Amino acid sequence: MTADLFEAVPDLRPSREAMAEGAVLLRGYAKPFESEVVAALREIIARAPFRRMFTPGGHQMSVAMTNCGSAGWVTDRSGYRYDGIDPDSGLPWPAMPRAFRGLAATAAAAGGFENFAPDACLVNHYAPGARMSLHQDRDEQDFAAPIVSVSLGLPAIFLFGGAKRADKPKRYRLEHGDVVVWGGPSRLFFHGVAPLADGEHVVMGRQRINLTFRKAN
Ligand code: MD3
Ligand code: FE
């Protein structure tokens, strides 16, 4: 049985670490999905290239973004929102690949959230120096659904605060293949990413990519 094999070979047992109530870190969970996920990612980027969007305040983000799925997260001078159309091409965002859907749903279940069916995947691209300041994710309709994040490439320091902006963030190093499921009370916690340190990742090169699966609508 699979469960017995994991017991007998402790290095193969997926690790789970509670970060807060409803937040679970599954280190290396995405490794078995790596080749399919990276291949699907290449196709998405070919159809909907990364772009650095502008915040409503007029600042250009250091993180470059794209999306797949029926809804995509966008920001411009008029605000933050989900939109089914890529504003750069005027076309619908690429469909959510099967490999993405499968990884997100099995990880959510492993984190305690059955039947997670994301309609949006925001793909974040960090070059060395790129960062994401402390914020909440609150542009989605349904906060009962978790958010699942998959880290690829260079390691990053993830800043995980609390319900209030003033709550001192804890720091977590997120590496290639790590998956985090954020649900329950942690769903609306403040979080961010420290400036990416330079380096070279054997599979992904000089970058970090984060897949963020959400139920937007
Ligand atoms: C924690 N992205 O896209 S992982 C974002 O690594 C975002 O690119 C980061 O924050 C990144 O909004 C962090 C994803 C994440 C997403 C939602 C969360 C972490 C979260 C909601 C609550 C708490
Ligand atoms: Fe976020």
Image (cartoon, rainbow, N blue to C red):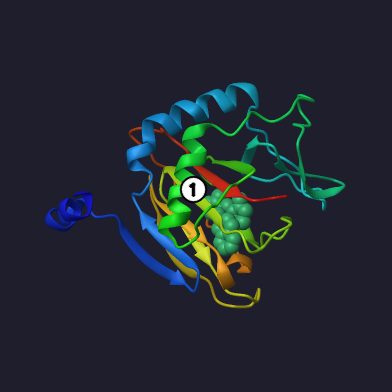
Could you tell me if residue 116 is visible in this image?
Answer: yes
Is 34 on the left or on the right of 47, as rendered? left
Q: Position of residue 84 (x, y in %)?
A: 75, 36
Q: Amino acid at mark 1?
A: Ala
Is 140 on the left or on the right of 44, as rendered? right
- The answer to which of 120 and 109 lies nearer the viewer is 109
Could you tell me if residue 195 is visible in this image?
Answer: no
Q: Residue furthest front?
A: 1
Q: Report which quarter residue 139 is drawn in.
A: bottom right
- The answer to which of 150 and 53 lies nearer the viewer is 150
Q: Dividing the image into four equal quarters, which quarter contains ligand 2?
A: bottom right
User: Looking at the image, is 22 positioned above or below residue 42?
Assistant: below
Could you say whether the residue bearing mark 1 is in a helix, strand or loop?
A: helix
Q: Position of residue 82 (x, y in %)?
A: 75, 45
Kindly identify the residue that appears in the image at 67 percent across and 59 percent down: 137
Kindly identify the residue that appears in the image at 63 percent across and 27 percent down: 49
Q: Report which quarter residue 186 is drawn in.
A: bottom right
Q: Position of residue 123 (x, y in %)?
A: 58, 40
